[in-house]
Amino acid sequence: MIRLNVNGHDHDVDAEPDTPLLYVLRDDLALNGAKFGCGLGQCGACTVMVDGRAVFSCLTPIALLPGRNVRTIEGLGMNAVQQAFVEEQAAQCGYCIAGMVMRAQALLEHNPNPSEQEIRDQMAVNLCRCGTHMRILAAVRRAAGRGVKS
Amino acid sequence: MALSKARIIAAAVALLVVGAGALLWHPAIAPVDTHAVFSHEQVARGAELAAIGDCSVCHTATNGQPFAGGRGVPTPFGTVYATNITPDPETGIGRWSEAAFKRAMRDGIDRAGHHLYPVLPYPHFTRATDADIAAMYAFLMTRPAAHATAPLNQLPFPLNQRFVLAGWNLLYLSPGPWHPDPAHDAAWNRGNYLVEAIGHCGACHTPHNALGAESSGQTLAGGQAENWYAPPLQSASPAVRPWTQATLADYLRTGFEAHHGAAAGPMTAVTDELAGVPDSDIQAIATYIASMMPKTAPEPVMARAGGDPHAAAIFAGACAGCHGSDAPMTRAGAPSLALSTVVNAPTPQGAIQMILNGIPWREGKSAPYMPSFGAVLTDAQVADLASYLRATYSEKPAWTDVPAEVAKARGSS
Amino acid sequence: MTAVLSRRTLLAAGGGLVVAFSLHAQEPKRPGSLKETPSLDAWIRVAPDGRVTVFTGKAELGQGLTTALLQIAAEQLDVAPNRIELITADTMRTPNEGFTAGSHSMQDSGTAILNAAAQVRGLLCDAAAAEFGVAADTLTTADGLVHAADGRAIGYGELAAKLNLHVDATANSPLKDPAAYRLMGTPMQRIDIPAKLTGGASYVQDLRLPGMLHARVVRQPSYGATLLDFDTGPIEHMPGVVKVVRDGSYLAVVATKEWQAIKAMRALAAAAKWQETASLPDEATILDTLQALPVKDIPVLTWQAQAGAPVKRLKARYSRPYLMHGAIGPSCSVAQFVDGTMTVWTHTQGVFPLRAALASLLRLPPDKVHCIHTQGSGCYGHNGADDVAGDAVLIARAVPGHPIRVQWMREDEHTNEPYGSAMIAEVEGAIDADGRIVDWDYAVWSNTHNRRPNIGGLMLQNAALSDKLPVPPPAPIPMPEGGGDRNSNPIYALPNARVVYHFIPQMPVRISALRSLGAYLNVFAIESFMDELAEAARADPVEFRLRHLQDERAKAVISLAAEKFGWSAGKRGDGRGFAFARYKNLAAYCAIALTLGVDHETGQIRLGRVVAAVDSGQPVNPDGIRLQIEGAIIQSASWTLYEQVHFDRKRITSFDWSRYPILRFPAAPDSIDVYIVPRPGLPFLGTGEAGQGPTSAAIANALKDAAGVRLRQIPLSAPAVKTAIGV
């Protein structure tokens, strides 16, 4: 058993310590937001926050996580970032979008007023294949304008 | 990385003493308003030399126009900003004559007569031939001009006083042309020239002394680049599979070699530049460096089971997807970590930097990539993982200074 | 008498060259998919409590289809969209509308629902008229109620309870006046986005059924690889492992938890030994290799007319490499085998054809296979979606009772999905002294663009299983839609033209349908060549296009894009390019103007401002149209600038995103603005693939303007551009 704190709640998880957080979130905690995209840290579909920083949950074995705080898109409710994504209609298939929101959330918590270049560089980690890039960038700018609470 | 204050003061005092004695005045070289028309061949040759010399690597800021300067180069003494070497007349070198350019390359003195910091590797360029310097000049003078001024260097007093460099030059700059070694063939000599006079490999791969100069007698014996481990390129190479001329050429041209792995850290920019260099020059560089490398090495170990179970779990969940024996990247030809130079190196610095920073994307380029783990791993976890890699994939003794090296790397990244 | 090609029949035939003609001498045709599924209650049902259910045989692929269909139904029914339930592709519930592909959904399903909804509303009004004893044309509808002029009102549910909707639709429908539309033509927020932003269960990947087990497959490392015997015993005893499934060279593992399945799969992959052959051609010379293969020549068109004397003649060769769909989410499916019936949750583009393919793979009658479309990651054509369903059913049959969830690993998707075919186009053209094109010779070489499975022989697993089904030969998709020859017929009015499609049956690399099929290269070639001819004629490229066009809608789209961009015929060299196409010359019109910059030292292209104009007929969800075009521009920019499937003589070597890089955020354009030419009341024109072709040529044309070099081989990679521009 490993104790994980996810979205402010402790969970005792019966999983092997090498299990990447992604599978624990999806299979043990029934959270859908983080997605399997590559398992290689190349696409960001699995992005969640650990102690306030955006990480690839597919490459984060739960052995790393006791005593640390995991945050997923389910823990945001419908906050300013998500609301901005709705207003910009910043999704096509949407498979990448939870990861995009989490990456943006982490960015804006650390840098409330990023420049366009900073947004693009930070978001570069996450891939979108539908070509929703302009909407996603607009959503991050929109959320930045409103201030994002951590 | 910050050097101890005492060390900086000692260095500065030494330079002041020597510099005072060597304080020579250098005249400005008259500005020019027009330039010769350069031949296409000369510009093209200049482009190749500039690539081997990595001019754009330092002289281009992130997302900046090539050669427009502004990139901060971290040194043990502070940050030095590369200048604009486009032909902009006001902020670049547009009014530099070829003679002024040559003086900068040979003596480290700019057109106005000011000393340049040896972050510009003029102790190497001083060996370059007149024709090669002229070709690089022709190449730079035909680039699009950019109006850009580099930020001020961040150096402590008195290192921010350029005259101290006069003393440094007296100690460490030995002007004079490069001489071929008749004991070796033309390819070897060509490689030796390109490595010493243009490529300045020693700027990273040779250890530096307290005053930031390459230590004499230790050419290419291994050094540091922006706090990354730069392995020895001679008999002390820790490579598990000996480098050969062919594998070196392959690595230099593509940034990847199936028995050694991928270029990482500051080296990726070097191999990216070399991708466009004529094959004969790559082969020559490889010939020269391979001649200094060990010819044999012990067989690599197979990954050993066991070890720290906590670190083993980290490896299984975070690393095995690419570095496992059955991982797609491994099946596609990436070497086992048992062949990794950084895992077999005398210090954990390279392994730590790889774990923390990975290998970034190069836009649109099919090339090795590794995610950075700096955001998710604590310092202790990085240290545990590095030690685990050493124990599992190397016969060499355990590193002793791992947590301190992690802290140092964190401070620099 | 007119002969109309039925795409439905064609697509249902899958690989077979089956061309069906529906001959209608007198009776007018029913619109859209009502032709194949005429019964109104196949599309719309009204429950006694007034709840409305709408059925479509098409699927949500991320293109916003469900929202647009709801807008149509709500508009014509006068029911609020949030009171309508939409059921998408399901072999037991919805009409068979073939594949959700080819930008056909609005034309087929949207048109069917538009008309069915109008007719249902008409029948409800007729029933209300009888109930109230008034004339139907005195009644109005609003919000699920029929209102009489005297104030009486009656709900749809009450009326529907007495009404038989199991009647065939008529050819003509009492459609609303487009001027009165309140929902169609007005942007509506996508209904599926909120759940996707809050962790709702939106995808087949999110299915979590009682007793569900996880499976992974150890794929053949190369085409035709043979699995040699080895001991699977140690893996069968790994934690959580339920079963190792092996049949010939097919190898899979089932475990209780997903990570256990992955670890067992890795262990199996490490233990497995394969016999492989060097079956692939040399990547460096693939275009020449393809062009030298035997072809079947298909004449596309021959035009002959009087024209001026040619004064300049140009010739060029254009090409594209194999391209990947590259879904962000690897393909996934869940299957469950209970009492001889296989239920499959799948993100296929065609539940009915897939049902036939799976039934054939399993040797089951089709009615024992039930395919339910469940959203997946965007697919952009025929990717791994169908094949992973093949995995799910094979494994589910081996572990009866349990739902089996299979998701491909990244490398499975990258190296096994069927790619978009590499293609070559050669074009020769001549202009006269007045700068008019007087001659046009065009030839295109391509594999088929359709290997979508409708029989087991086309499933990926067939190559691995010990008992193989026959594999049908590839077939071209006939014009007017076309496959490799899609959009090879120029839209321009040319006096003399010859177009031929050299169809290459032999397929060295596994290929199938990738978004826009051959149109991507054909539009790249035609629209690049139009600029080359314009330059030869010393004409502005926009004006040059207009002078060769007669289609007024084409002209309007071009003019709008040029106007919004601020295109001027004067000074050039500022890195701007223009291109235009009407997708298939049947669907949406799209013109694109853009700017770009070129890094002289590296050859890297940086996209600046992009302006697009589009005519999709009657717009339903304008924001959806804009988003489709934005997506097409960025996806096509990624194809055009970077993409190329790499392989050695044995294996596909583009096994992940590091070896098949696609566009990331820093390379996105500075801006994209999409303008719509509204055409109220005109038929819907499919839009999902309208932008890919024009984007590629606009980039090549802008590159020529910016750097003076004409690149004709996709990708326009940084090294290729640098080589062309020199030092």
Image (tube, coloured by chain):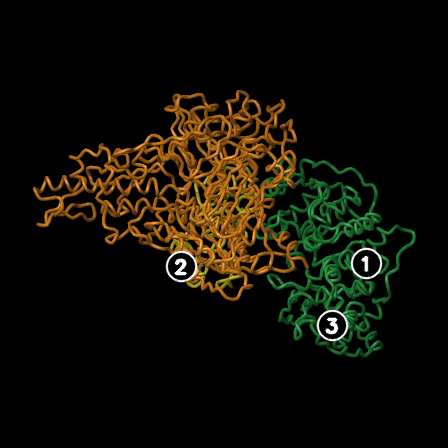
Chain colours: A yellow, B green, C orange
Q: Can residue C273 be seen in this view?
A: no
Image quadrant containing the N terminus of chain C: top left
Picture layout, residue B93 above or below residue C359: below
Q: Name the residue under label 1.
A: B196
Residue located at (66% from left, 52% from top): B353
Crowdedness near tag 3: few (<14), some (14–19) or many (≥20) residues, C-alpha within 10 Å = many
Q: What is the quadrant of the C terminus of chain C in the image?
A: bottom right
Residue tagged by mark 3?
A: B159
Q: Is residue C188 left or right of residue B310?
A: left
Left or right of C160? Residue C508 is right
Residue B249's mark? none
The answer for which chain carries disc 3 is: B
Which is closer to the viewer, label 1 or label 3? 1
Q: Check disc 1 and report its element: helix, strand or loop.
A: helix
Q: Closer to the observer: label 1 or label 2?
A: 2
Disc 2 target residue: C560
**Closer to the N terminus: mark 1 or mark 3?**
3
Residue at mark 1 shares a chain with residue at mark 2: no
In the image, C182 versus B352, the foreground residue is C182
Q: Residues within 10 Å of mark 1 (few under 14, many from 20)?
A: many
Name the residue at 32% across, 44% down: C69
Q: Which residue sits at x=70%, y=36%?
A: B304
How far from the left and from the top, in percent, is residue B286?
79, 49
The three-letter code of the residue at mark 2 reads: Leu
Q: In which quarter of the image is residue C239?
A: top right
